Image: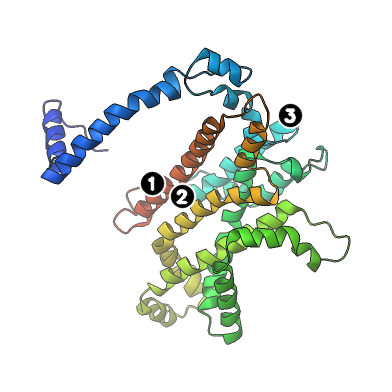
Amino acid sequence: MRPLPPMDTMPRRALHWSRYNLFSSPANTLLTITGVLVLYWTVPGLMHWLWWDAVFDAAHRNECRAAGSGACWAVVRVRLDQLLYGFYPVDQRWRVNLAFVLLLAALVPVLRRHVPGRRYWIAGSVLYPLAAYWLLWGGMGLAPVDSSRFGGFMLTVLIGVTGIVSSLPLGILLALGRRSQYPVLRLACIAFIEFVRGVPLITLLFVGSTLLNYFFPPGTAFDLLFRVFIIVALFAAAYLAEVIRGGLAAIPRGQYEAAAASGLGYAQTMGLIVLPQALRISIPGIVNIFIGLYKDTTLVLIIGLLDPLGISQSILADSKWQGLSTELYIFIALGFFVTCFAMSKYSQHLERRLSPAGSGADPG
């Protein structure tokens, strides 16, 4: 770790940084002064509304208005469980908490290279989808819970994680298929990718919620949430395929020739040499699609699934909390920001770790 500079040099360094970044030119100086004035005029009033004059304990909006002139965070406190779990049975919410803890454990071998007993962690990651399904939907000793009871951030995380995990391998296969030497396979992949990328996700969700049942035998009940899983995964896979195809195109031809000279077949060449490099190149684009996919989960509100925005609408329909949309939307936006910012920072860490200059420096 880089040692801290001596105390007598820190003010000098701060002055040098300020002169270089904030006052390096007349234009930068003007922007800096303008920014400071804007912050001076806006931040105190914003902090009064957000915190100092805010009300955190009230039974309804009239108590909030009587107690203070700031934000009424009591609506978030009172309806927090609903924002997190939707309408999942209260006495069964421990199953959602356990599924989330197991999700974090399943991500450990994916996010970290050096983990003691890594193969056992990987085995747990492989089995996690089955465990999560059993916990969330029930059966075999657990009370069954219909997916119509799912909602809030629980639903957002469920759709986002399912879409991210399932779309990446599909995107890799589509990217390889688009570069295939077999015309039928190549044309099929191209047609699928271009069709999906040319249609808005909301249109596909409408199709999945209304028309997909017509392709199944009469009387077949296909859960709406599972239809959303499929559509979101296919939608993201089409975009990932183009990003990964760009990474594959960036690999020098000499890599393929060297692999052929070493006697490696197509699967070995792709799995051991080409794909690892292509995925490393494509990390920023892949993470960007993942973040967009996670935010696009709010579109399920249109087809009747109650994500956090849907839950907020049901809360605002209650006469006790009408008119407090700002507080609810700020809370929801903060939840999305924290998750998306974490994904973005991890992608930067992954880029540094996999770069040739930093591959040996980071043990993570």
Q: Earlier in the sequence, mark 1 or mark 2?
A: 2
**Residue 347 position in % (x across, y down):** 42, 51
Whole-angstrom CA distance, mark 1 to mark 2, is 8 Å
181 shown above or below 212: below
186 shown above or below 193: below
Whole-angstrom CA distance, mark 1 to mark 3, is 42 Å
Tag 2, which secondary structure?
A: loop
Q: Which residue is mark 2?
A: 113
Q: Residues within 10 Å of mark 1 (few under 14, many from 20)?
A: few
Rendered residue at 64%/37% (across/down)? 313
Whole-angstrom CA distance, mark 2 to mark 3, is 38 Å
Task: Locate residue 209 relative to residue 194 in the image: left or right.
Answer: right
Q: Is residue 160 visible?
A: no
**Quarter of image, res 236:** bottom right
Q: Nearer the viewer, residue 246 or 253?
A: 246
Q: Amino acid at mark 1?
A: Pro
Q: Which residue is mark 3?
A: 90
Q: Amino acid at mark 3?
A: Val
Q: Nearer the viewer, residue 342 or 227?
A: 227
**Quarter of image, res 142:** top right
Q: Is residue 101 visible?
A: yes
Check if mark 1's residue and mark 3's residue have beta carbons within 8 Å: no
Pick out the residue farthest to the right: 219
Check if mark 1's residue and mark 2's residue have beta carbons within 8 Å: yes
**Residue 212 position in % (x across, y down):** 75, 64
Tag 1, which secondary structure?
A: loop
